[in-house]
Image (tube, rainbow, N blue to C red):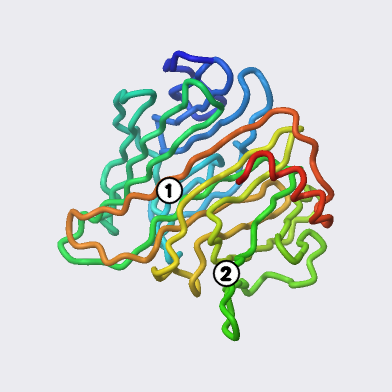
Amino acid sequence: MGEILIKEVSYKNYGKCLEISNGSIDALVTVDCGPRIIRFGFIGEENEFCDEAPVEIDFEDDKFYLRGGHRLWHSPENMPRTYMPDNKPLKWERIENGIRVSQDVEPHVQMKKELEITLDGKKNKLKVVHHLINKNAWAIKVSAWALTIMAPGGLEVIPQPKSDTGLLPNRNISIWSYTKMNDPRVYFGEKYITLTQNPSMKAAFKIGINNEDGWAAYFNHNNLFIKRFEHFKDRNYPDYGVSYETYTTDYMLEMETLSPLTVLEPDEEIVHIEEWELIKSVVRPNGKDEYEIERVLKEYIG
């Protein structure tokens, strides 16, 4: 681990990608389409991300392809605004310890997306700085929405808010119309919510929460993936006030963070930061045993 290396590679059906590595972990970023961070994992080992998402949505004479991996959207979700096709090549440049990729301004919605992706040379950590820029001639109200599609078969752990609010509620939990509260994949504990990805269950499940701790974890492949972000207690969030959402179906589980809702004037931007960490050889806990979950996580999450 040490020097950050960047090289062009070809990956599956995604065409040209940029591989960023530090000798221990690597990430692949699409440049013929997207942007997507289509792979993240230990070098030569399994992809922690799902990189084959069989979703296509027609849009006029084009298509939106979900593709998989990590992407940037804008919230609240809306059809067709959210699903602008991103099938054109990107501009990219080297920056310190990584790259910056930028997309052309989206037609119709007039939004521009940029990602700055940097690796730590001493730890198995990656930072993604998301830029969402308003190129309209008028102000819009929007939130940056960072979504990571995880490989199947894992266990997600989401912390519940701990704020002592006395006689007032301290958490928002948003439920989508297709979500079943008795879904066997989800467990609502005292401190955590856990969600198990089950390849044999196709029914969609989604919830959101005001994730004040600013992290979520995913156990898979005997590794631990941690996603960190900042939650702002004094700001408003989309989807009834949630800063973190998760979604699962038969082929993947999605870990989603959101920035506060912001009124963007023309040429203003939202900057939303995630930090990822990947830890090798971590025993997956029982998803319904909060004592065991806390014992495993305390070493990695303060």
Q: Nearer the viewer, residue 298 or 93?
A: 298
Which residue is tagged 2? Answer: 163
Outermost residue on the bottom side: it is 167
Residue 170, horizontal then vertical, whole percent: 58, 75
Answer above or below: position of 146 versus 163.
above
- Can you tell which quarter of the image residue 46 is in? top right
Answer above or below: position of 57 versus 1.
below
Q: Earlier in the sequence, mark 2 or mark 1?
A: 1
Residue 257, horizontal then vertical, whole percent: 50, 54
Residue 124 is left or right of residue 260, and the answer is: right
As shown in the figure, which amino acid type bears the numbered disc 2?
Ser
Disc 1 packing (10 Å; few <14; some 14–19; many ≥20): many
Residue 202 is left or right of residue 167, and the answer is: right
Which residue is tagged 1? Answer: 72
Residue 16, horizontal then vertical, whole percent: 44, 23
Residue 112 is left or right of residue 273, and the answer is: left
Asked if the residue under mark 1 is in contact with the one under mark 2, i.e. CB atoms within 8 Å, the reply is no
Residue 214 is left or right of residue 283, and the answer is: left
Residue 119, horizontal then vertical, whole percent: 46, 27
The residue at the point 62 percent across, 44 percent down is 301
The residue at the point 74 percent across, 72 percent down is 181
The residue at the point 66 percent across, 49 percent down is 253
- Spatial CA span between label 2 and label 1: 30 Å
As shown in the figure, which amino acid type bears the numbered disc 1?
Leu
